[in-house]
Amino acid sequence: MKTFSAKPADVEHKWVVIDAEGAVVGRLAAYIATRLRGKHRPDFTPHTDCGDHVVVINADKVIFTGNKYEDKRYYRHTGHPGGIKETSPRKLIEGKFPERVLENAVKRMLPKESPLARTQFGKLRVYAGPEHKHEAQQPEVVDFKSLNTKNVRSA
């Protein structure tokens, strides 16, 4: 037996569209991170970019479970002394760029700051509304909500 190692030239990247309306953020982000890395493939190689291009629509309609919509906090630092800033998912979703909630969740699930991680994260396109401009790539539609009953928040 020989260990198979995928070469970048041999990998075929597919395009996938996911509708995020009503989906739970953490579960959706974990699924997207798996697709971006290529871990769903039998020929996964950790040092090669073998993931798919992922297009997410309706990112402004994602759902948090429990009280996370109000209580969860995101922290960032400006770089200056005492420059810690905090915000909540409610402020981000109701703000100017609601897609950043999902982008940050996915980015934090990918490998930390490496050229490979930046390449993989660059294959993620998140849109707040139902329209996207990647029809020419003939993306495959993935019904994320029907994969597991926990992927959608029940009322």
Image: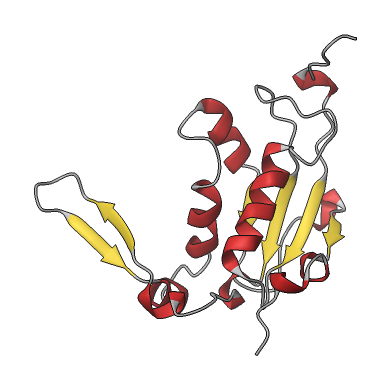
The one nearer the camera, 95 or 3, is: 3
Report x, y in % for residue 92.
41, 71
Q: Residue furthest front?
A: 1
User: Residue 24 vs residue 101: left or right?
Assistant: right
| Residue reaching furthest to the top | 2
**Residue 56, percent across and down?**
68, 61
Residue 126 in sight from this viewpoint: no
Relative depth, front residue between 142 and 46 = 46
Q: On screen, 58 above or below 137? A: below
Name the quadrant of the C terminus: bottom right
Toward which corner of the image does residue 135 lie, by quadrant?
Answer: bottom right
Would you say 118 lies left or right of 10 here? left
Picture quadrant where residue 60 is located:
bottom right
Q: Is residue 64 above or below residue 55?
A: below
Q: Residue at x 65, y 79 (%)?
A: 153
Q: Residue at x 85, y 21 (%)?
A: 10
Q: Position of residue 124 (x, y in %)?
A: 63, 49
Q: Quadrant of the N terminus?
A: top right
Residue lying farthest bottom? 155
Q: Position of residue 45 (x, y in %)?
A: 73, 24
Left or right: where does residue 141 sit relative to residue 93? right
Does residue 139 show up?
yes
